[in-house]
Image (tube, rainbow, N blue to C red):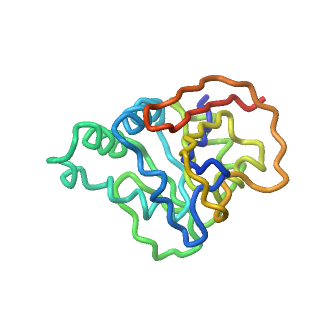
Amino acid sequence: MGRLVYQASTSLDGYAADERGNFDFAAPDEEVHRHVNDGEASIGTYLLGRRMYETMRVWDDPELFGDGPDYAQDYARIWGRINKVVYSSDPHVSVGPATQLEPVFDPEAVKGMKSAARGDLGIGGATLAGQALSAGLVDEIRQYIHPVVIGGGLSWLPQHLHLDLEPLQMHRFESGVLFLSYKVR
């Protein structure tokens, strides 16, 4: 049985994106990127909202990173081997390799995916992850907290959510980014 892991990069004040939808404050440096790569090693399937998938889709073409740094090339290979499920009510969304489109997020279907999974499942996008958190499906939360306050935008967690958590790991990067991970009890 696989775990469902929610990983997000946030501002210190808890936003995944600013009021315009920008998240450039969370661009990882080499040290953070390598840490992300290590954390993605256990992921076999990613559940993504449409906007997050459209953002991440650049990684579908590993040739774009052929002349880039080795850690970017590594991430492109990791992304390429991961199956993706994209949730969108628009049936005309274009998806890439190893990607299936689902019209709605179905908690029961996700439970089935977790039961059948050989590896972990990741979930990306604050809105979709909020649905999974509210449904009690998330097993682990990983947060990269960037040293910036943006004052508003898309919260990385849904309002009125209460979870009891068990600390798993904490790491401070040279850039000031903090990594925290928790098991959901």
Q: Position of residue 102 (x, y in %)?
A: 56, 62
Q: Check the image and report above or below for 157 versus 151.
A: above
Q: Position of residue 106 (x, y in %)?
A: 69, 56
Q: Position of residue 35 (x, y in %)?
A: 42, 32
Question: Is 162 placed left or right of 4 in the picture?
Answer: right
Q: What residue is at 71 percent from the left and 55 percent from the top?
A: 131
Q: What residue is at 63 percent from the left and 34 percent from the top?
A: 115
Instruction: Depth check: give the residue in front, 123 or 82.
Output: 123
Q: Position of residue 163 (x, y in %)?
A: 81, 38
Q: How many marks?
A: 0
Instruction: Depth check: give the residue in front, 40 or 150.
Output: 150
Instruction: Depth check: give the residue in front, 11 or 119.
Output: 11
Quadrant where the image shows the C terminus: top right
Instruction: Depth check: give the residue in front, 127 or 26.
Output: 26
Q: Check the image and report above or below for 111 versus 95.
A: above
Instruction: Locate residue 5: give its quadrant.
Output: top right
Question: Is 67 placed left or right of 46 in the picture?
Answer: left
Q: Check the image and report above or below for 165 versus 94.
A: above
Instruction: Locate residue 175: give its quadrant.
Output: top left
Quadrant where the image shows the N terminus: top right
